[in-house]
Image: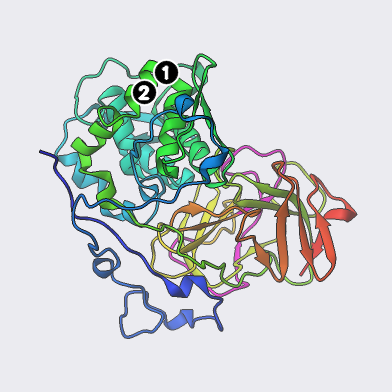
Amino acid sequence: MRKTILFSLIFILTACTTAPEESPDWENYDPFDVSNPQAAIPLSTLLPPTRAAGEAISTPTPNAARFLPAAEQGSGFKIIPDSELVYGPASLLLDMEIYLKGKDGYIKTYEQEVDGEILSGPEIITRVAQDYSINPRLLLALLEYQSGWVTQPTVSETNFPMRYYTEWYAGLYRQLVWSANELNRGYYLWRANAVTQWTLADGNVVGANPNINAGTAALQNYFATLYTREVWDYDVSDEGFFATYEELFGYPFDYAIEPLLPTGLAQPQLTLPFERGEIWSYTGGPHGGWDEGSGWAALDFAVGEPLGCIPSEGWAIAAAPGVVVRSDNGAVVLDLDGDGYEQTGWTLLYMHMGTEGRVQSGSKLNAGERIGHPSCEGGLSNAAHLHFARRYNGEWIPADGKIPFILDGWVSSGTGVQYDGFLRKSGKSVEAWDGQNPKNEIKR
């Protein structure tokens, strides 16, 4: 008898879909003061049950006419809802420390050095979940399915627990990094209607079934990169990964938020992310929000002549009022709805912010206040710059999609090639260019 959890979710934040008329008074702002009209919605009312446990839901699918003949298609079984893929509102339901107290798995004793810091297994999962915007519940379930790390104190595979046997990716952190990137790749390719088949580990292909959803596409892509057709068929069936997920957390669709992106979603009012009067360079058009597999949610900006990774003297600034919910490892996340959760509503990622001068977590900022200095900190980069990206409810929002970046009236567009693109405003056009060049200069 299937165990179910009545945690179906609905999430409506109308304030996040319209431009703010004026900046909040952050000096007197308390996000949990219910008498304050700007106050955040309490978590207990943010996540109410809305559907009977196990009740079927309709998930949107792309146009079936694009796909291979039915005989060449793979499984149409839906494994998880979209909201179980992203680090979104549903992920707030997992308290990893409490959850793992009832388990005796190897992950509880595992430690690894990551960027010069010793992290525990749960801390590694949290870091990857935050960076890649992947639901930690999904990462835990995959880790259990592949190697038994969640429930078994002794495991046979300690170096390659996600079964990606490439030496560079040994250890839990890089195994999860690779996995998260492949999960994102399947998810956002499906979202963009840019995939019709999966390439298996032996080079053969299996047609994508038009009845699946983006969350399921993420897992079908992940397993395709690792296995041949017979194993893949089992992994994506109701007897494969789905069964392990259900055993750990219950029926996955009981966590569903549909739609994850509300109809009519619009970007709030944003400025260019640097100070007035300064000339910056638009150095990167639409590209991955975090790593190449994620949605092309990011734009790059730099200031001054390229000086390698020496931190820039210029300041990145808050493009809208918000609360800083994370500031570490070169990343600053600005929460625009002020509820203190980066999993809900609109958030802005400022990446490669140098340690010196970087805004602290918990800071309440008005539009225009300083975030930090562009550098190379927190990731691979050949020169100091600002990597600037958006998420809504944990989903990366493509800068070249239906909701383009609009920054002081400049509208982003892409060319179908990563890092290529334009910003256009009132007949003017600025082209993305790697380096300092008159064609990529932009000024507030």
Q: Closer to the camera, 444 or 426?
A: 426
Q: What's under tag 1, amino acid-wise?
A: Arg
Q: Residue furthest right?
A: 438
Residue with the mark numbered 2: 233
Helix, strand or loop at mark 2: helix
Vertical placement of residue 338 versus 33, above or below: above
Main secondary structure along the magenta-highlighted residues: loop
Residue 94 in sight here: no
Q: Closer to the camera, 361 or 419?
A: 419
Residue 323 left/right relative to 40? right
Residue 201 in sight here: yes
x then y, percent, for residue 53? 18, 53
x then y, percent, for residue 17? 50, 71
Q: Which mark is residue 229?
A: 1
x then y, percent, for residue 138? 34, 40
Q: Quadrant of residue 119?
A: top left
Residue at image position (35%, 37%) is 139
Vertical placement of residue 65 versus 197, above or below: below
Residue 21 left/right relative to 345? right
Helix, strand or loop at mark 1: helix
Residue 217 part of the magenta segment = no
Residue at image position (28%, 66%) is 43
Q: Specify the quadrant that holds the C terminus.
A: bottom right
Callout 1: few (<14), some (14-19), or many (20+) C-alpha neighbours within 10 Å?
Answer: some
Q: Closer to the camera, 227 or 364?
A: 227
The reply to whether dot 2 and dot 1 touch (C-beta < 8 Å) is yes
Residue 226 left/right relative to 411? left
